[in-house]
């Protein structure tokens, strides 16, 4: 079925493009005056961040926009640097290996400190995830991103996401938005060096952007060294004013040693040590990743068609308690139609999409002898297939009030083929079908502030990691289903800006690793009762003071600005037969960040910041052992200009606080300390310089 959809998409591409191209040529001759003399029109495929901000205001739920300039004032090397100020989003590093991170929105994939699940990653609107839903934080380069869109929960329907966490879309620069030449280098504690050079230009109907980068570090802890290389390109060609095609490529090689988890006692005594087993078995995670994608956009008036194709190849060498060799190839295609014409004389926007994808996953597993494979323990060849039809309509009923409605039809298959037969044939196949509705309201209080409310559902078939055991035994888990109600406000008025959302998710069949009533481990299964994910996502900023030094007659003034982030994350069982109403582990219930910066119109800035986990949180479902609260102070200063030289200095964890950046999860710790704690970095100093031509 999925292969047929891919063929249909290819046929649509071939059939529709000549007609639209011809129609668009006629449109150009009728309206020749739309071109602004002396200015480049820009890309129709890749809107700039201002256009993206306008689109996000139409979403009846939690959304955020992170511009590149928001993160470049300090270290810009890790997922936490890029996404750490997004309300509702948790980024927790693993093994002080900053690129190997747990990324979770509203508790999605909470068991994963590696190879994330429950969150759709995209680059330029094209999927980065594997077809089975798995993904990796290493697949994007923070310095090669123009801006990032975060759609929390069901608010990512416009990109076809069906996950609890929603979607994160990384938008790369184009030749229209990038500098002709840019170079940046960051370095600091623990042997950290992050360097990048990039270039972007427009040459007639062509434009290009290319970025080459390397990230290296020895690591705060033993056995946590990294060496990552990334090459990324984004090139476009305008066939005419209404037809543009873009091609995206990525090549990544990431070599990461894994220091492993410590007991709390070991962490308190010496947080820089590695787990002894990780050293003796040479735990590491080496990835080689290649991606090719294309997007062609046909525009005719207020109508637009996007034709998308993508392929990726992923190779994994992963010595842990066993040695895993993995190869994954994913293919996909999508047709997305947008119509922004009026309906009944009122503003309206309709988005309809059809996508299909196929992923082939081959895994070989061996016993581990000092990091080298010996005897085979399992071999599987697996196929994931998915087809998705989605639609969303935004209709302005009356001035200031917009109604948003939509839905998704999902078909997915998981086919696991045992090739080793250690315990007989453990092959299996499961088919998943679902309909996810969505409805919401957006009310404009003013031109710059809004109220919103919405209801949506998500449906997540398990990834292959949730369908097989370490011995490759097949486990036919059900899909995880959530129903979410949310509401909030966002806006900017005078000195203030704010983004606040309350949400409540009722989740059936949440995928968790549980025990039964006798204490017998069941592995990853569907929770037998409903679980609840609810919380508050708050981000706010304020201009505290003006004109401290600069004369009041100057065209630009100096100022002091502040910003805060607060996440209340209340995740719990709801009448579970074993765990009752216990709190789900992995995340602090209350998390807070704050920063105050002095800014001078010359480009100078400086100020302190802090991160705080207010109270302990459990590492087990039985809630018997806990990670401790912590407070981390930091400070940064620098000088930044749009062109020419810029530089920064930053110190993190000034007080050298010992804390758990993330934890593993166990079913029942029985109150005993166990090796589930991943220490965060100690006191660290970073500096960097950049030049834009």
Image (spheres, rainbow, N blue to C red):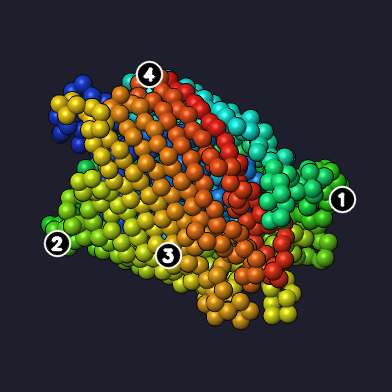
Front residue of 385/582: it is 582
Looking at the picture, does residue 489 appear above or below residue 631? below
| Whether residue 684 is situated above or below residue 101 in the rendered picture | above
Give the secondary structure at mark 3: strand
Residue 125 in the image: x percent, y percent?
42, 45
Tell me the CA gap for discs 1 and 4.
Answer: 57 Å
**Residue 213 visible here:** no
Of the numbered discs 1 and 4, the one sitting upstream in the chain is 1
Q: Is residue 473 visible?
A: yes
Give the residue number, with chain letter if any, for mark 1. 375
Q: Earlier in the sequence, mark 2 or mark 3?
A: 2
Relative image position of residue 497 (x, y in whole percent): 28, 49
Residue under pointer 3: 535
Marks 2, 4: nearer the viewer = 4
Circles 2, 4 touching at the beta carbon (< 8 Å) = no
**Residue at left offset 48%, top offset 40%:** 634
Binning the other alpha carbons within 10 Å of mark 1 as few (below 14), some (14 to 19) or many (20 upward) gives: few
Reading the image, the residue beneath label 4 is 644
Mark 3 crowd level (few <14, some 14–19, many ≥20, 10 Å Cα): many
Q: Read off the residue under disc 2.
A: 398
When the figure is inspected, residue 492 is found, relative to residue 472, above or below; the finding is above
Position of residue 337 relative to residue 650, above or below, is below
């Amino acid at each position: 079925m999925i292969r047929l959809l891919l063929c249909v998409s290819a046929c649509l591409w071939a059939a529709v493009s000549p007609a639209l191209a011809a129609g668009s040529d006629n449109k150009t001759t009728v309206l020749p005056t739309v071109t602004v003399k002396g200015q480049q029109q820009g890309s129709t495929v890749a809107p700039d961040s201002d256009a993206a901000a306008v689109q996000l205001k139409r979403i009846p739920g939690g959304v955020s926009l992170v511009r590149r300039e928001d993160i470049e004032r300090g270290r810009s090397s890790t997922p936490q640097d890029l996404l750490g100020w997004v309300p509702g989003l948790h980024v927790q590093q693993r093994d002080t290996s900053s690129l190997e991170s747990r990324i979770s929105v509203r508790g999605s994939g909470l068991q994963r400190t590696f190879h994330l699940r429950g969150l759709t990653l995209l680059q330029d609107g094209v999927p980065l995830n594997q077809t089975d839903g798995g993904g990796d934080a290493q697949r994007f380069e923070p310095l090669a991103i123009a801006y990032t869109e975060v759609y929390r929960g069901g608010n990512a329907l416009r990109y076809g996401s069906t996950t609890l966490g929603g979607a994160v879309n990384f938008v790369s620069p184009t030749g229209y938005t990038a500098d002709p030449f840019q170079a940046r280098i960051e370095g600091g504690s623990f042997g950290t060096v992050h360097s990048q050079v990039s270039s972007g230009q427009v040459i007639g109907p062509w434009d290009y952007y290319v970025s080459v980068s390397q990230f290296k570090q020895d690591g705060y802890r033993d056995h946590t060294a990294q060496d990552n290389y990334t090459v990324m390109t984004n090139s476009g060609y305008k066939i005419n004013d209404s037809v543009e095609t873009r091609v995206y490529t990525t090549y990544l090689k990431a070599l990461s040693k894994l220091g492993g988890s410590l007991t709390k006692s070991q962490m308190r005594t010496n947080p820089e040590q590695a787990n002894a087993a990780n050293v003796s078995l040479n735990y590491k995670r080496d990835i080689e990743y290649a991606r090719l994608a294309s997007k062609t956009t046909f525009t005719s008036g207020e109508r637009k068609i996007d034709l998308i194709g993508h392929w990726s190849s992923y190779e994994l060498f992963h010595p842990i308690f066993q040695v895993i060799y993995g190869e994954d190839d994913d293919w996909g295609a999508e047709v997305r139609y947008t119509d922004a014409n009026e309906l009944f004389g009122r503003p309206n926007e309709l988005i309809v999409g059809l996508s299909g994808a196929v992923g082939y996953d081959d895994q070989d597993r061996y016993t581990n002898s000092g990091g080298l494979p010996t005897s085979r323990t399992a071999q599987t060849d697996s196929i994931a297939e998915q087809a998705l039809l989605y639609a969303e309509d935004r209709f302005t009923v009356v001035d200031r009030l917009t109604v948003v409605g939509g839905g998704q039809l999902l078909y997915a298959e998981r086919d696991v083929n045992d090739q080793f037969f250690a315990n007989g044939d453990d092959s299996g196949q499961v088919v998943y079908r679902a309909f996810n509705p969505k409805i919401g309201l957006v009310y404009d209080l003013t031109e710059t502030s809004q109220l919103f409310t919405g209801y949506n559902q998500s449906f997540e078939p398990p990834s292959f990691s949730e369908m097989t055991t370490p011995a490759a035994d097949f486990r036919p888990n059900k899909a995880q289903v959530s129903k979410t109600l949310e509401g909030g406000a966002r806006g900017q008025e005078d000195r203030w800006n704010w983004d606040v959302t309350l949400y409540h998710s009722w989740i059936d069949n949440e995928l968790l690793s549980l025990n039964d009533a006798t204490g017998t481990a069941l592995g990853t299964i569907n929770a037998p009762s409903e679980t609840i994910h609810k919380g508050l996502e708050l981000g706010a900023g304020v201009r505290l003071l003006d004109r401290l030094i600069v004369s009041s007659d100057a065209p630009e003034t100096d100022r002091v600005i502040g910003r805060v982030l607060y996440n209340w994350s209340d995740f719990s069982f709801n009448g579970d037969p074993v765990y009752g109403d216990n709190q789900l582990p992995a995340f602090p219930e209350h998390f807070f960040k704050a920063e105050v910066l002095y800014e001078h119109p010359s480009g100078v800035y400086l100020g302190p910041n802090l991160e705080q986990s207010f109270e302990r949180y459990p590492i087990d479902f039985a809630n018997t052992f806990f990670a401790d609260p912590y407070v981390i102070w930091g400070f940064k200063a620098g000088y930044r200009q749009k062109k020419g030289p810029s530089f920064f200095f930053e110190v993190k964890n000034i007080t050298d606080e010992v804390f758990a950046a993330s934890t593993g999860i166990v079913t029942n710790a029985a109150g005993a300390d166990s090796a589930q704690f991943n220490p965060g970095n100690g006191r660290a100093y970073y500096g960097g310089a950049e030049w834009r031509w």
